């Protein structure tokens, strides 16, 4: 039976829906992703959505990161996301209209099968992954780690767990903080009681900063649901930070960003059979 929001389905969910369980079982990576990583994939798509949705409007208006010196990879990402969003959005509308109006779902199911929705999803995700990897190549280390996590969360062959994703995102935030400190050497010099010279200050940010950031990391001993919630919160927060820095906007306030991310998190509903 169909269920959940198809905009966040991995290819395996579409394979099961269109062609059945035996078809899916023959495709090991997609079967494993469907059986064990539905929420991980949905989280990754949600994070990509957070990253791209605001930036897309800037791209379409000819401003933002895609118009900068390294604009080509980001333009590639915006175009890949726009294609994905419009396609799966149309599919969702088709499904919703049938269930909301009490119509016959048979013709819709046949349409998805004839148009090979699973293969379309695979191609669109491949385009997103290629674009994200291209953006990694022209990004700072902090943003690059965030983008890498987005690829891992949504790739059918990935085995990255949420705890590993959180660790990478924490590294990304520390790197971002270090970069901010490097850009304000005079402030560091004024506040540094140890009297380090400028080069040392640039190379070794205060340990207290790393400790403060690390202290906010999701605990590896937390319950699985809590770890998942923490992972989603950090992915969304850092994606928003990435978008802000890529577009040259001020970074969102830490407390406000954390609060907004928690309040605005999407409720991911399991895919068929999930």
Image (cartoon, rainbow, N blue to C red):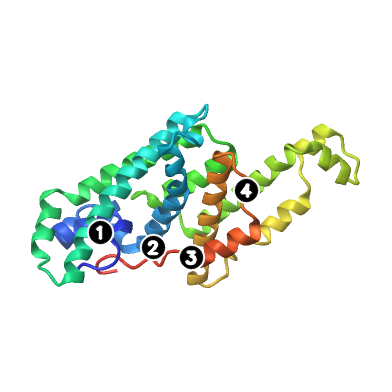
Residue behind mark 2: 39
C-beta proximity under 8 Å, tags 2 and 3:
yes
- For the residues labelled 1 and 4, say whether their Cβ atoms are less than 8 Å apart: no
Q: Position of residue 46 (x, y in %)?
A: 42, 56
Q: Which residue is mark 3?
A: 228
- Left or right: residue 22 versus residue 204 is left
What element does badge 1 sit on? helix
Which is more foreground, mark 1 or mark 2? 1
Q: CA distance from mark 1 to mark 2?
A: 18 Å
Question: What's the distance in space between the residues labelled 1 and 3, CA to CA?
Answer: 25 Å
Q: Quadrant of the image for the N terminus? A: bottom left
Crowdedness near tag 1: few (<14), some (14–19) or many (≥20) residues, C-alpha within 10 Å? some
Q: Is residue 25 visible?
A: no
Reading the image, the residue beneath label 1 is 92
Where residue 259 appears, as percent x and y from the top left, is 58, 65
Query: Is 72 situated left or right of 68 in this image?
Result: left
**Tag 4 residue:** 251
Which comes sooner in the sequence, label 1 or label 3?
1
The quadrant in which residue 12 appears is: bottom left
Considering only order in the chain, which callout, 4 or 3, is on the residue closer to the N terminus?
A: 3
Closest to the observer, 196 or 179: 179
Question: Mark 4: few, some, or many residues within 10 Å (few <14, many ≥20)?
Answer: few
Q: Earlier in the sequence, mark 4 or mark 2?
A: 2
Q: Closer to us: mark 3 or mark 4? A: 4
Q: Would residue 98 appear left or right of 169 to someone viewing this image? A: left
> Label 2 vs label 3: CA separation?
9 Å
Which residue: 18% across, 61% down?
17
Mark drawn on residue 126: none
Residue pictured at 52% horizontal, 32% vertical: 138
């Amino acid at each position: 039976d169909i269920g959940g929001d198809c905009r966040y389905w991995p290819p395996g969910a579409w394979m099961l829906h269109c062609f059945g369980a035996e078809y899916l079982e023959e495709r090991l990576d997609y079967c494993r992703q469907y059986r064990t990583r539905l929420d991980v994939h949905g989280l990754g798509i949600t994070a990509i959505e957070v990253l791209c949705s605001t930036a897309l409007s800037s791209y379409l208006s000819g401003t933002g990161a895609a118009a900068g010196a390294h604009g080509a990879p980001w333009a590639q990402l915006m175009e890949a996301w726009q294609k994905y969003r419009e396609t799966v959005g149309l599919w969702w509308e088709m499904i919703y209209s049938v269930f909301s109006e009490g119509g016959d779902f048979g013709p819709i199911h046949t349409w998805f099968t004839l148009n090979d929705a699973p293969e379309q999803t695979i191609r669109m995700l491949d385009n997103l992954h290629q674009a994200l990897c291209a953006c990694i190549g022209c990004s700072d280390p902090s943003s690059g780690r965030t983008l890498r996590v987005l690829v891992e969360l949504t790739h059918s062959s990935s085995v990255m767990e949420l705890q590993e994703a959180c660790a990478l995102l924490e590294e990304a935030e520390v790197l971002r903080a270090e970069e901010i400190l490097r850009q304000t050497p005079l402030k560091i010099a004024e506040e540094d009681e140890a009297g380090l010279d400028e080069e040392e200050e640039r190379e070794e940010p205060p340990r207290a900063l790393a400790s403060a950031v690390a202290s906010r990391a999701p605990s590896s001993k937390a319950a699985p649901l809590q770890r998942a919630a923490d992972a989603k919160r950090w992915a969304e927060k850092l994606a928003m930070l990435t978008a802000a820095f890529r577009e040259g906007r001020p970074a969102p306030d830490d407390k406000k960003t954390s609060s907004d991310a928690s309040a605005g998190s999407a409720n991911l509903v399991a895919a068929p059979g999930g």
